[in-house]
Amino acid sequence: MFPFGVDYYPDQTPEKYWETDARLMQEAGINVVRMAEFAWALLEPEDGKFEFAWLDRALAILQAHGISAVLGTPGSSPPAWLIHAHPDLLRVRDDGVRIPYGNRHHFDPSHPLYWEYTRRIVTQMAEHYAQHPAVIGWQINNEFGDRSYSPENRRAFHKWLQKRYGSLEALNAAWGTMFWSHIYRQWEEIPLPLTIAGSPNPGLALDYYRFMSDAYVDYQQMQVDILRKICPTHWITHNFMGFGYPLINYFDLARNLDLVSWDNYPCDQWRNNPNPDFTAIALGHDTMRGLKQKNFWLMEQQAGAGGWEMISMAPRPGALRLWAYQGIAHGADGMVFFRWDTCRYGTEQYWHGLLDHHRQPSRRYYEIKQMGAEIACCGENIRGSKVKASIAMILSNDARFAFQIQGNNPQFNYNAHFVDIYRAFHRRQIMVDVVEPGADLSQYQIVVAPALHVVTEAIAENLKTYVSQGGTLVLTPRSGVKDASNAVVEMHLPGLLAELCGVEVEEYDSLPPEVKNQIEFVWPDKELSAAESPEVGIFCEILSPTTAQILALYKQDYYQGRPAITVNPFGLGKTVYVGTLGKETLYQPLVNWLLEIAEIQGVLSVAEGIEVTERWQDEQRILFILNHTTQNKILPLPGHWRNCLEDSAPLVGLASIPPRGVLVLAESKDENQA
């Protein structure tokens, strides 16, 4: 069956409510819960004393109602007794101050003693639940990610550097430590990139960001190894935080997990908008699907108004169902809402679940109950179906880390730039995979690598292979600037990619907010009727083609009439180099041209605010039409379709979709079977 569930906290809920909770869950079609990821203090109330009876009773009640469980390892929130005994387990901020106890994610992932305590509680849980019939999988901790600048991490960082560089001579050469007389003669001399020290050496800072990412990967792997050994029939995941989370290399974190899951909150106290940017949410789903190039779960899907100190707007009627189906449309094979009930205590008193504080079913519960009935009917036909993308976008965590260290321009934001380009494809209803720089790109017709700032020989060769075999590559400003140690390359930009691009950056101009430029397209064999002079800014690179053709010219300033965008034939393919930054008026016509020359069509041509995606179950096409607007929409529907969500007449010709409504349609080759 399609996993459809909630995050449930019997550790925070009086036991008298458990039976009623399970009954209401069953009535809503819920068949799975996630539990216990924050329950360390109850699972181990004293050092070395373990108590699982309460969780056993909760599992028994849930199992009696046909509900399985994913258990969380509880390392994200250590118990007070542990921190009281060992306060040095707490993280240190980047200003050198150790954080106090009282929140979560306040542990140091490199601390050997924390590893010991984590190893012990995970082993105890695994041994106790390895054969439990209700337990199907594990979630490692919860939302990894905060960096720590502790003495323990500094020592671990030194060991990481020794393994990476082998010698101090190699490290000094890579970082260029002769600058400001920072040459290191002992590993112990190497500092951490604290903010109180001002601007750190870029090589030092990038390696520390890599180290911290690896620290979480290693800490997770320790737990994965325990669970694989003791619970070989259970699957293992971690709940990621979408495209925007910038502190961990998620490709590395996902590599040794069985599946990726993530936490999706379109509207909370930090993004308080009842009509959130559904394109940015779509990118989150596509990124999570891309981490392992396979379908994923939503382990925390918004179930009510979100907030800690402040409360967001309530999700409007239909929004919870709409947001959940958007996840399924982009490849989710499991849907778990956060949370079941709204907690009366603690920081998340106002992070609303399906039940309010009074615990009685109301609007949100019944909306999800409707979806539960729909999923019970069609979920198994959807589960396992594939998203097929002909476009890929390369997400470089090294580039993202490097821009955190040196932003280049206060207006530039790597994530925002990525979203701007993705939006142009999404507006055309084009499915996109998000991949890492070293991925196999051969299946894609177009690959876009926004601001590919850090480029190694291996990355350059991967891109050359892709283009030479017939692919179309798109690069944007500040690409090829840095080597693996975050040093500027000693060659014309875009560095190792210059031959591939057929262009050299003669000069670059970093513009303040009040200074803009414009470009004019000079498309080969194409008339352009709109957006003939897009506004550009932030960065303007003056390009000098070697073998490339010119696609656009600057219209202003001292580089008026000089190339801004080029296209270069390379082997059987081509590389487009976009030497400046813009918004929709730049990226939409550029993407339209790319799709035209690649002969790629969107799923459907629809009005603004409608999202259309498709999944494939073998040769069966499943169409998802999502209305993100507050108006009823009518759209043309070629072919014959069966409505998967309700028993109704076949859809032919036109489809009507209500405000915040959803259609899930199965294509019929034979109109009599529609």
Image (tube, grey):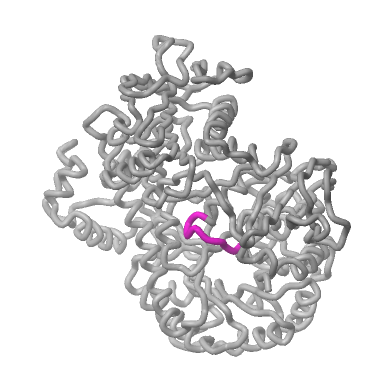
The answer to whether residue 279 shows anywhere in this view is yes
Describe residue 421's horizontal placement relative to residue 651 as left or right: left
Which quadrant does the N terminus fall into? bottom right
Residue 300 placement: quadrant: bottom right
Residue 354 placement: quadrant: bottom right
The answer to whether residue 308 shows anywhere in this view is no
Does 295 lie within the magenta span? yes
Q: Residue at the spot x=49%, y=45% of the render?
A: 392
- State the image coordinates of residue 563 (x, y, percent, origin top left): 41, 17
Q: Count how many numbered circles sit on residues in the image.
A: 0
- State the image coordinates of residue 593 (x, y, percent, origin top left): 55, 29
Q: Is residue 517 above or below residue 621?
A: above
- State the image coordinates of residue 561 (x, y, percent, origin top left): 43, 10
Describe residue 88's horizontal placement relative to residue 433 as left or right: left
Between residue 520 and residue 454, name the one nearer to us.
520
Q: Residue at the spot x=76%, y=44% of the render?
A: 638
Q: Residue at the spot x=67%, y=70% of the render?
A: 2
Between residue 279 and residue 188, name the one nearer to us.
279
Q: Residue at the spot x=52%, y=71% of the render?
A: 139
Which quadrant does the C terminus fall into? bottom right
- State the image coordinates of residue 377 (x, y, percent, origin top left): 77, 69
Between residue 176 and residue 622, name the one nearer to us.
622
Q: Is residue 540 above or below residue 26?
A: above
Between residue 138 and residue 388, name the one nearer to us.
388
Region rendered in magenta: 290-298
